[in-house]
Image (cartoon, grey):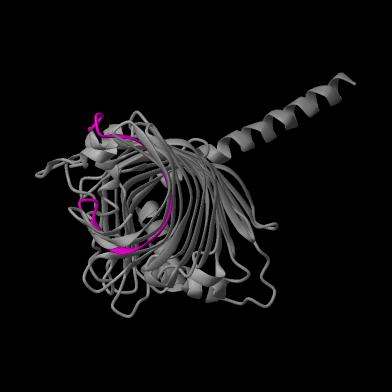
Amino acid sequence: MVKNIKKSLKYFVIIAGIIFMFPTMLYLVLQIPSVQTGIVKRMTGYLSGKLGTTITIGRIEYRFFNKLDFKDLLIKDNNNDTLVYSGEVNAGIRSIDLRNKYFSLGRINLRNPVVNLITDSTGTMNLTWLLNHLNSSGDTTNRKSSNFHIEQVDVNNARFMLLNRKGAKSASRLDFNDIRLSGLNGMIEDLGFGSDSTTFNLYNLSFRDASGFTLRRLDTRVKLSKQDILVKSLVMLCDSSIININRIGLKADSGASFKDFTKNVKLFIDIKNSLFHTSDLEYFIPIPRGMSESVWFSGRIEGTVSELRGRDINLKFGKYTALDCDFDLSGLPRLENTYLFIGVNSLRTNAIDAGNINIPGKGYLRVPDVLYRLGNIQFNGNFTGFTTDFVTYGEFKTAIGTIRTDISLRPDESKSYKVKGLLNCNEINLAELTGNEDLFGKLTIHANVDGSATSLKKFEGNLTGKIDSIEINKYDYRNIDLSGSFTEKTWDGNI
């Protein structure tokens, strides 16, 4: 019995020694330069032939027990330009199951990598070419889909370029046809490549674009599939903006739908209370450089670009201005052909906010004195029509009285607006509006307006209707018919 136990222990020690010695010997063998050179040549030769491009690795180092270091990794594209380069890549192997085609890596470190996504003059992006080439290579009749998982990828001081050689230069400061990012750092966690989708979490992403736009931090969760893109819990910190987005989604019926993105791809954006500052927005939209204003924004935007809806849109600006509205837009991206409906649930503002806007090189925005006399303004109603012909219907409540409108505005060739419709004013304080308390009191009027205006200070037209009441020299006049023409300086008609 004792002999059997000793014999079993002897075999166990031998087997354990073999198990221990194998990775040790493998490690020692892989340190031999000629062995490394042979492995590198075999690996890069196989991959280069399979992908139809140039792949080179300066050196591979295996470290006990499951660590691989790649030196000077280079992948070129179909035009012999650099697609990916990294001076050093460290990877930890978790598990490899060749039978079930499952691969799992632990932590990968990328130091000073360079990624160049280039669309050539034929309209083909090098990454798309590589993926298509990879998918089309080999026997696909009995191909079993593989799963690939990486626990964490650390990116340190990367450079990234997105260049479209076929595209025209963008009108915005940040050129989307020539994006060049430097100082790119971030961490990708739980990166999984499945048969039909890719998922990952992104943390602490930061970079600076060549235009000057700087992203301080971005955290989010992403899922990519053939027809869907879903981004959740996105937090984005720029130089002066703080953006919080619950969800961004793109959904298409098929991959072909993306060829007509504006009509066939549905989008959904749910923005929480976020701060947008002009110093960041000026890189994307035409805002005078050096302007320093901020807007708080929240709401949901959904539908296709050509049939876009906004719900629970809330905007806050300055000390007095706040907007709560819904909208429907039909006809984008051609703004001149877009039918719009904007339902204003509540609008509060004051001319003081507009007067505090400082435009670089031009000074503070000039606001007519008459608007300051309106005090705090409240509006609810809607705007309906096209940008070239729309109707505003609703009620304005001001410090000097209430105004109800049902008026259409239509621009003409002389750069003025044709104004036509109904105007009802209830107990307007003319004394406050004109600054002449001795002559005027309150005014109530129902009138039809047919005229034109190039500004709040220059207008003309015809006015017909009835003055229900007006106070002049402390006397109350009632039920007065009126008709005639007017300008900003004169009145030519009957009262």
Residue 55 on the magenta segment: no
In this view of the protein, can residue 137 be seen by the observer? no
Q: Is residue 100 above or below residue 263?
A: above
Q: Is residue 93 left or right of residue 214?
A: right
The quarter of the displayed image where residue 147 is located: bottom right
The percent position of residue 290, horizontal first and vertical second, equals 17, 41
Q: Which residue is more in the foreground, 276 or 34?
A: 276
In this view of the protein, can residue 479 be seen by the observer? yes
Q: Which residue is more in the foreground, 246 or 214?
A: 246
Residue displayed at 37% across by 68% down: 388
Main secondary structure type of the part rendered in magenta: strand
Q: Which residue is more in the foreground, 181 or 353?
A: 353
Residue that lies at the very extreme toward the right in this rendered image: 1
> Which region is colored magenta?
436-457
Residue displayed at 73% across by 28% down: 10
Q: Is residue 65 left or right of residue 156?
A: right
Instruction: Please state the total of marks drawn on the protein image.
Output: 0
Q: Is residue 183 left or right of residue 268?
A: left
Q: Is residue 4 above or below residue 284?
A: above
The percent position of residue 341, horizontal first and vertical second, equals 51, 59
Q: Quadrant of the C terminus?
A: bottom left
Residue displayed at 67% across by 78% down: 141
The quarter of the displayed image where residue 350 is located: top left
The percent position of residue 346, horizontal first and vertical second, equals 50, 40
Residue that lies at the very extreme toward the top in this rendered image: 2
Q: Quadrant of the N terminus?
A: top right
Q: Is residue 380 above or below residue 140?
A: above
The percent position of residue 224, horizontal first and vertical second, equals 56, 56
Residue displayed at 86% across by 19% down: 2
Residue 445 on the magenta segment: yes
The quarter of the displayed image where residue 449 is located: bottom left
